[in-house]
Amino acid sequence: MTSYSDRTRHGMSAVLAGERRGIRGKLLFAGPAIIASVAYMDPGNYATNIQAGAGYGYTLLWVVLLANLIAMLFQALSARLGIVTGKNLAELSRDNFPKPVVWIMWAISEIAAMATDLAEFLGGAIGLALLFNLPLIVGMAITAVITYGILLFERQGFRPMELIIGAMVGMIGLCYLAEMLIAPVDWGAAAGGMFSPALPDQTALMIAVGIIGATVMPHAIYLHSGLTQGRAAVRSEAERRKVLRFSNVEVVLALAVAGMVNMAMVMMAASAFHQGYAEVAEIETAYHTLTPLLGAAAAGIFLASLIASGISSSVVGTMAGQLIMQGFLHIRVPIWLRRLVTMVPAFAVVAAGVNATQALVMSQVILSIALPVPMIALIIFTSRRDIMGDFATGLLVQLLAIIGAVVVLGLNFVLLAGVAGMDLPI
């Protein structure tokens, strides 16, 4: 009996051979970018988006747009690497860099994977704890059980997991569509904030850095190349080009949805909190403040989206951690052990009494330190003709990638300098 993943792969082959046409055939290629897009709607984004909207209204929407465009470019490059080479970014790093460099890259990437899971795991736990009035530690235990249960579907191949994560992405999107219908959004001011760059003060700069610095995430870059490697059986260069076209379209659509969700978060916070509640900066405070302002429905929808975000992104984070370890070290550990290892920091943080939202912010700082590793490696590999052949990136794409990397890494430096207490000018 063939699995759903096998049937999907067979259907893709039929589309590539011209034996099957129509939108249903093209949808078979959707999945990798949808999974990767979860990284751009994780609980870490909730904190920065709430701060942006509450403190500055619609002014920082342009930052979300810029971050999304950079994310599209790097996720498209990651997918391209996997499709063309049949290897993921971690594997290519192991094969092409000296061993000491590989060990350092693995250690940094492993820390980044754990920091990512800290934010995602805590987000789901906070949502469950608030929704059902539970202690945070109980919410964490429930999140752990649910995420482990979803991870078991990996045994059935790639397609069931893509559909499960896709359903959660759809749920997050619908939640914020509903929020837009409930919240009194000033659409004119929103349009102005999206296309009129401005940074009113030092705090706005730091929030902008937080938004961009947490957008292109290390684990998403690694994972996307792994999700596309060998997914579709290609028999010629022409078929490979078709797969790349499908992949690029999916990246644009999936990341556009993620970008719209982030913009909706900022707009909801702007419309609900900016006038009179500009000090709102924590997820828990936002939830408790939403109820009297916009009603219980808006607050409940906010938590539902947070829970879906936390659970789905925690699942994706564990998948990325597994791929990183397997790619760099050629070691595959059982899912339950991987899940346990990445949960330990979250439980330790809560047991130590650290503020949950503050822990989310600190995890973004750790990710900022780790981000240069996959970004630079991706730019190097996708531009090398000995690795990519005729699919190596051209000068224009290389230039855009370098500019994007300079912007993100430069802003990450500003973030780290701010955390260190350095007073930087706007």
Image (spheres, helix red, strand yellow):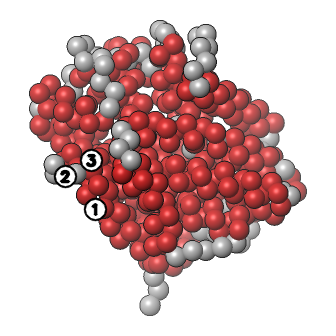
Name the side, left or right, on which 43 lies relative to 392: left
> Do callouts 2 and 1 mark residues in contact (Cβ within 8 Å)?
yes
* Mark whose residue sits in front, 3 or 2: 2
Q: CA distance from mark 3 to mark 2?
A: 10 Å
Circle 2: is it few (<14), some (14-19), or many (20+) Cα within 10 Å?
some
Q: CA distance from mark 1 to mark 3?
A: 11 Å
Q: Is residue 8 above or below residue 41?
A: below
User: Residue drawn 70% across and 72% down?
Assistant: 330
Dividing the picture into quarters, in which one does residue 412 lie? Answer: top right
Name the side, left or right, on which 200 lies relative to 299: right
Q: Secondary structure at mark 2?
A: loop
The residue to which callout 2 is attached is 134
The residue to which callout 3 is attached is 127
User: Residue drawn 59% across and 25% down?
Assistant: 420
Identify the mark nearer the N-term, 3 or 2: 3
Identify the mark nearer the N-term, 1 or 3: 3
> Do callouts 3 and 2 mark residues in contact (Cβ within 8 Å)?
no
Q: Which mark identifies residue 142? A: 1
Where does the image place residue 36, in percent across and percent down from the top left?
51, 52
Q: Amino acid at mark 2?
A: Leu
Q: Is residue 143 above or below residue 68?
A: below
Assign the N terminus to one quadrant of the image: bottom left
Q: CA distance from mark 2 to mark 1?
A: 10 Å
Q: Secondary structure at mark 3?
A: helix
Where does the image place residue 244, in percent across and percent down from the top left?
64, 55
User: Residue drawn 54% across and 31% down?
Assistant: 212
Dividing the picture into quarters, in which one does residue 70 lie? Answer: top right
